Amino acid sequence: MYIRHDWALPGVRALRDLPLLERVHRAQTVHREAVQENKVPLCSLLSIKTGGCPEDCAYCPQAARYHTGVEAQPLMETPDVLAAARSARDAGATRFCMGAAWREVKDGPQFDRVLEMVRGVRALRLEACCTLGMLTSGQARRLKEAGCTAYNHNLDTSRAAYSSIITTREYDDRLRTLQNVRDAGITICSGGIIGMGESVDDRCEMLRTLAAQDPHPESVPINMLVRVAGTPLAERPPVSTLEMVRMIATARLLMPRAMVRLSAGRMQMNAEAQLLCMMAGANSIFFGERLLTTGNPELAQDMALLAAAGIEALAPQA
């Protein structure tokens, strides 16, 4: 299998523009070569500090400047987080992700508490993933020392479209955090959101930027915009579920060994669309009733979906 990091936008666009069934076939072929087990790991995501964020991400109900009904809540206590992690493990999760609505990590008691949470999650024999905003190199090293296995920091969209979605940080800030995470030896979880008003070229450029990283991100979540009342993107027209299939197939072709995660937006997709995404190369899903502050299918629905397709959930470590 040939792994490339030198894709140009026209080449990515050519892959994306292949007839849908041809693209799915190619992606499935690559997927079967790279990921031979017919099993998917289940990930659970908990908001450990909700709302009150100073950023202006146009899609996010946790931004303090928008009136979305999300009430700001302080950082959770460690025992409560570990109880949620234990429940997620017992339900079948292999990775427990902790998200805090911060612009950036600040050294001090709250970050120390997050490090304690990471150590506790690892003691439960779960992978520990964090998404806490921007990180310095020193903070990334401290997370690694605590046992953090993955760090999520999405690019969201292309560099060209970024300023139309977020003005409170720069695109290079995101890339710098990803480099700090990589340098610390933590695996990278980074993807994007479709349906925010970006062009098809923007979607392709976002994937190209991820595929240019060496090594590729170990995890690439593909999200469909969840339109939340009170945010600037609340009235965006819904994106076609087939566009999710196109994005997942293109991500699989560009980054053959990545864990391509079918993430936000599954509530807007029927079972057949989700299965087509898995055929196109998605090999992980987030489960649980919520993704931070937005809805997600319930566990029973997800297990029925996987069973109907003959896909097994990857067993948690004992």
Image (cartoon, rainbow, N blue to C red):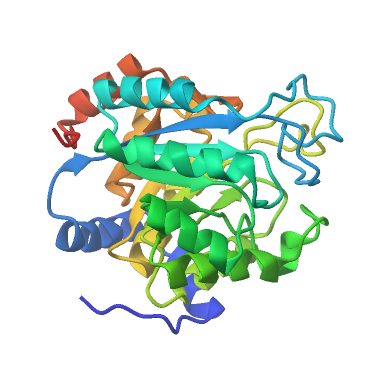
Judge from the rendering whether residue 103 lies leftward or rightward of residue 135; answer left or right: right
Image quarter (top left, top right, bottom left or bottom right) of the N terminus: bottom left
Image coordinates for residue 204, horizontal then vertical, percent: 55, 66
Image coordinates for residue 127, horizontal then vertical, percent: 31, 43
Q: Give whichever of 178, 77 is nearer the camera.
A: 77
Judge from the rendering whether residue 300 lies leftward or rightward of residue 222; answer left or right: left
Which residue occupies 53% across, 69% down?
A: 180
Residue 120 appears in which quarter of the rendering? Answer: top left
Which residue occupies 31% across, 36% down?
A: 275
Q: Give whichever of 198, 47 is nearer the camera.
A: 47
Residue 159 appears in which quarter of the rendering? Answer: bottom right
Q: Give whichever of 45, 14 is nearer the camera.
A: 45
Relative height, residue 291 to residue 139 (above, below): above
Which residue occupies 46% across, 49% down?
A: 221
Image coordinates for residue 117, horizontal then vertical, percent: 45, 36
Which residue occupies 48% across, 44% down?
A: 115
The number of numbered badges drawn on the structure is: 0
Relative height, residue 301 to residue 167 (above, below): above
